[in-house]
Amino acid sequence: MTTMAADTRLAPERAESASDIRRHELAAFLRSRRERITPEQVGLARGRRRRTPGLRREEVAQLSAVGVTWYTWLEQARDIQVSVQVLDALARALLLDPSERAHLFALAGAADPAPGTECPAVTPALRTMLEQLDPIPACVQNSRYDVLAYNRTYARLLCDLDAVAPEDRNCLLLAFTHDDWRASIVDLPEVTRMMAAKFRASMAGHLAEPAWKALVHRLEERSPEFREVWERHEVVDQRGRTKYIRNAHVGLLHVEHVNLWLGPSSGPRLVSYPPVDARTRDRLEELHRLASDAA
């Protein structure tokens, strides 16, 4: 009689999921930040029996007003949900700098309700590139149409951008609400419709993020035109094309809209407007001279 040998091969271990990896990274990051802070840095007494380097878990919980057990679970990489309010409190308690704070929220898979004003995408080298592109108008935008940096020619292309408050330097907002910007756009209804459609396509990956929702709310409050276009639910991808701009200083410009992605296609991009013809090239050079004289 022949007996079959038992199959002793082990089933392959379950592959660690992305969320598992992120939870363990978050746990390790919190632990490392906790251990580097001395009690004196946060106004606590050191005491005589301190064996833990840095702060104790209960001290972090106290400083951030969360339960000790709950915080311990975070450092143990338990599968629990973390609110943005708790993340904000932890960032403050652990004295995180802007880069560390951004990393904390990224590991938690949450949108920071109070992101730093500095944009890591705009490096000194990128600013130099913008300057060297003059007289070609160029700027750096994120996928939400925020203008993060720009050169002198771009500053006078559609309006006096330097006179616009930094928090209002958003191309979508300006296209629907700023009189000078709107006056510079030839075929305004088509341009604004396409911008809204591109914005909706980009927003699909950011639906829960406060900054995106706040911009939509602001536009809906200030622009009936935006409300009407937004309700169409149109979407298009980001692509360049030639366009005409009616500049207040040098007249009609015929330019190519060029996007140079600085990372994933949903992230920041360098936007430039090289001239299509010789007349536009001459007019852009004149616009750059005017902008330089005004600087």
Image (tube, helix red, strand yellow):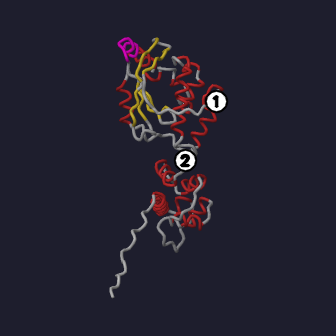
Q: Quadrant of the C terminus?
A: top left
Q: Residues within 10 Å of mark 2 (few under 14, many from 20)?
A: some
Residue 196: where, in percent of width, then height? 55, 30
Label 1, label 2: how far apart the Cα atoms are: 27 Å
Q: Mark 2 is on which residue type?
A: Asp
Residue placed furthest toward the front = 1
Q: Mark 1 is on which residue type?
A: Arg
Question: Pointer 1: what residue?
Answer: 227
The image's mark for residue 112 is: 2
Nearer to me, 222 or 284: 222
Q: Residue at the location (52% across, 55% down)?
A: 108
Residue range (magenta): 276-284
Q: Residue at the location (51% across, 67% down)?
A: 76
Nearer to me, 79 or 93: 79
Residue 102: where, in percent of width, then height? 49, 49
Q: Is residue 54 above or below residue 160?
A: below
Q: Is residue 7 left or right of residue 196?
A: left
Q: Quadrant of the N terminus?
A: bottom left
Q: Does 281 lie within the magenta span? A: yes
Q: Is residue 194 above or below residue 73?
A: above
Q: Does 78 lie within the magenta span? A: no
Q: Residue at the location (52% across, 19% down)?
A: 185
- Is residue 151 visible in the rendered image? The answer is no
Q: Earlier in the sequence, mark 1 or mark 2?
A: 2
Residue 147: where, in percent of width, then height? 49, 31
Nearer to me, 195 or 73: 195
